Image (cartoon, rainbow, N blue to C red):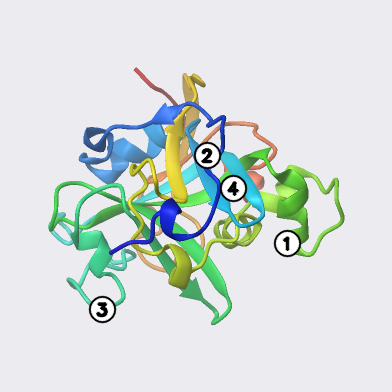
């Protein structure tokens, strides 16, 4: 079972950013979920207090049922001990290690067994920026871009690890890690090819808030503008 807040001896914050999303929000294809995640809040109730950021960049990775399969997706060859959380219910955290010391966080999408997901690439710090700087080994007051711009940076800033957070239900009100909606409205975004991968590099599955200082690799943000309904 995933750890819940009541089992971690953490005090539940009296004021939460917005409200939890519904499961149905995530039970759609990753290319639909990713752009609609922009503007939502990732909140971690850590041992050091509330750490939260607004999602400003995300990438979609398609499940193995996609035609053609997405060769850049961890799930494209089917379930393994590493990726099995992706084949479970939607809206659970999939956290994996890179280079043996850093972590990246994804959110599972679609119905159980289909294994699509969205990689969180960048956040805008909203709460706990001072602690995020400490977590990143930076001086207090470091700009948000240095804290949470890039998938491994944001995990480090929010103290997210595979051991502690992989498999958490992000919609459980007692989960220490949640995705919430505080009413922030996104109407225009930028759609580009994914970055930092070596396969399917031309698939337009990266979504970001145009001009936001915390978006990673801003010079590559040259794709088409898009509008959300």
Tell me whether the residue at label 4 lies in contact with that at label 2, contact meaning CB atoms closer than 8 angstroms: no
Real-space Cα separation, disc 1 to disc 4, in angstroms? 24 Å
Q: Earlier in the sequence, mark 1 or mark 2?
A: 2
- Residue 129 is situated, as x and y percent measured from the top left of the image, at 73, 45
**Which sits earlier in the primary sequence, circle 3 or circle 4?**
3
Q: Distance between the residues labelled 4 and 2?
A: 18 Å
- Does the CB distance between marks 1 and 2 fall below 8 Å? no
Q: SS class of the residue under badge 2?
A: strand
Which image quadrant: the C terminus?
Answer: top left
Question: Is disc 4 surrounded by few (<14), some (14 to 19) or many (20+) residues within 10 Å?
Answer: few
Q: Is mark 4 on a helix, strand or loop?
A: helix
Q: How far apart are marks 1 and 2 (CA)?
A: 18 Å
At 49% from the left and 19% from the top, the residue drawn is 185
| Residue position for label 1 | 136
Residue at image mark 2: 55
Q: Do the residues labelled 1 and 4 touch (CB within 8 Å)?
A: no
Task: Give the x, y percent position of residue 166.
Answer: 39, 64
Can residue 146 be spotted in the picture?
no
Callout 3: 10 Å neighbours few (<14), some, many (20+)?
Answer: few
Query: In percent of the image, x 46 and y 67: which residue is there?
Result: 164
The residue at the point 64 percent across, 44 percent down is: 218
**Closest to the observer: 70 or 125?**
125
Who comes first in sequence, dot 4 or dot 2?
A: 2
Q: Element at badge 1?
A: helix
């Amino acid at each position: 079972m995933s750890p819940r807040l009541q089992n971690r001896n953490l005090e539940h914050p009296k004021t939460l950013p917005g409200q939890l999303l519904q499961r149905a929000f995530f039970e759609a294809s990753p290319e639909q979920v990713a752009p609609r995640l922009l503007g939502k809040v990732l909140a971690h109730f850590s041992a050091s207090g509330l750490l939260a950021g607004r999602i400003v960049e995300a990438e979609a990775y398609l499940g193995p049922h996609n035609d053609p399969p997405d060769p850049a997706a961890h799930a494209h060859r089917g379930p393994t001990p590493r990726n099995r959380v992706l084949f479970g219910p939607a809206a659970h955290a999939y956290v994996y290690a890179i280079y043996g010391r850093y972590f990246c966080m994804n959110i599972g999408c679609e119905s159980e067994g289909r294994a699509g997901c969205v990689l969180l690439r960048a956040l805008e710090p909203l709460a706990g920026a001072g602690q995020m700087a400490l977590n990143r080994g930076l001086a207090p007051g470091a700009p948000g871009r240095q804290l949470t711009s890039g998938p491994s940076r944001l995990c480090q800033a929010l103290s997210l690890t595979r051991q502690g957070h992989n498999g958490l239900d992000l919609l459980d009100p007692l989960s220490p890690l949640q995705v919430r909606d505080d009413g922030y409205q996104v109407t225009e975004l930028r759609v580009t090819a994914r970055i930092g991968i070596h396969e399917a590099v031309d698939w337009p599955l990266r979504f970001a808030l145009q001009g936001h200082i915390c978006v990673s690799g801003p010079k590559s943000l040259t794709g088409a503008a898009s509008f959300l309904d």
